Amino acid sequence: MNYAALLEPVHHFLTCRTSQAWIDEARKPENLTLLLTDHMVCELKAAQTAAWLIRKYVADQPSGDLILAWLKPYENFIFREHHDTDFLNAHRGLTRSIIVRNELPWADDLVEKMVLLIKEELHHFYQVWEIMQARGIVYKKITASRYAKGLLREVTTHEPDTLVDKLICGAYIEARSCERFASLAPFLDEELQKFYLSLLRSEARHYQDYLALAAQISPVDIAPRVKAIGEAEGRLIAEPDSELRFHSGMPAGRE
């Protein structure tokens, strides 16, 4: 795979690159458990975001309930510590069609892109869990980073701007994930390096799908909102963070 060509638009979209200080901290062997745990949680949160968008804006009630059922085994594991790890059977159930409740011109596109994203993110969740299992890493709850909440503070509070801004936030989260996987991969062991590089194509497509939906739905040019939210994202990445997470900023004391 030509990783440079794949990453070029991602780097162009983001306002800054991951610092070497973050890479140096994240690559430390003693931080591997933390990074894998946070990565697994982030995969679920990405799926939750996509599911929320479908349920909030386009799905009928039975379809919305079905999506909640898709996520339940993963949520039970992460948030309620019900250690039922039969995620593969849960994943095989992600097949039924979503019924769109309205005639919005973008509804079908949103469902198609977000259902694919949910399936991929939950599959990545399972892959991270498998790696943790193989390495004897026991899942334990950790606190969330400030990153996603910081981005959501930029979201406008009236529609359709709220939806457009949330989609743009989603684009930045996926683009940053892609950039971080690529930045960290060369410093990891062979198994993790191969795994993280395998995620780049889907993460790059996810950010593009979010951005395309935002442009499709917005009645005006999204460039100013992309710029504003991008600048906020860059600040979150550049500012010091007391806790290391997959989307954390500069390690405290290294800025």
Image: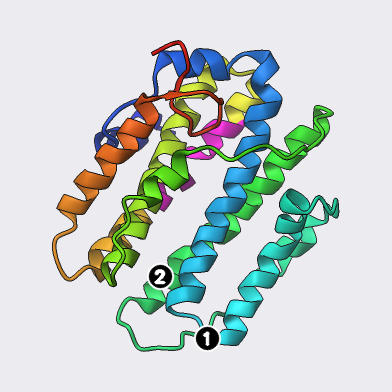
Instruction: Specify the quadrant of the image occupied by residue 127.
Output: top right
Q: Main secondary structure of the magenta part?
A: helix
* Earlier sequence position, callout 1 versus callout 2: 1
Above or below: residue 157 compared with residue 58: above
Residue type for callout 2:
Leu
Side of 122 relative to 202 (left or right): right
Q: Nearer the viewer, residue 71 or 108?
A: 71
Q: Is residue 197 magenta?
A: yes
> Dot 2 surroundings within 10 Å: few (below 14), some, or many (20 or more)?
many
Membership of 214 in magenta stretch: no
For the residues bearing labels 1 and 2, Cβ distance under 8 angstroms: no
From this view, report whether residue 115 is shown above or below residue 15. below
Q: Position of residue 43 (x, y in %)?
A: 59, 47
> Residue drawn at (84%, 54%), measured in percent from left and top?
82
Residue located 80% across and 30% down the image: 137
- Highlighted magenta segment, given as a residue range: 195-207
Is label 2 in a helix, a strand or a loop?
A: helix
Q: Is residue 96 visible?
A: no
Residue 105 appears in which quarter of the rendering? bottom left
Relative vertical location of residue 116 with respect to residue 132 in this rendering, above or below: below
Work out whether 97 lies above or below 209. below
**Residue at mark 1 to residue at mark 2: CA–CA distance:** 14 Å
Pick the quarter of the image with the C terminus: top left
Residue wearing tag 2: 110
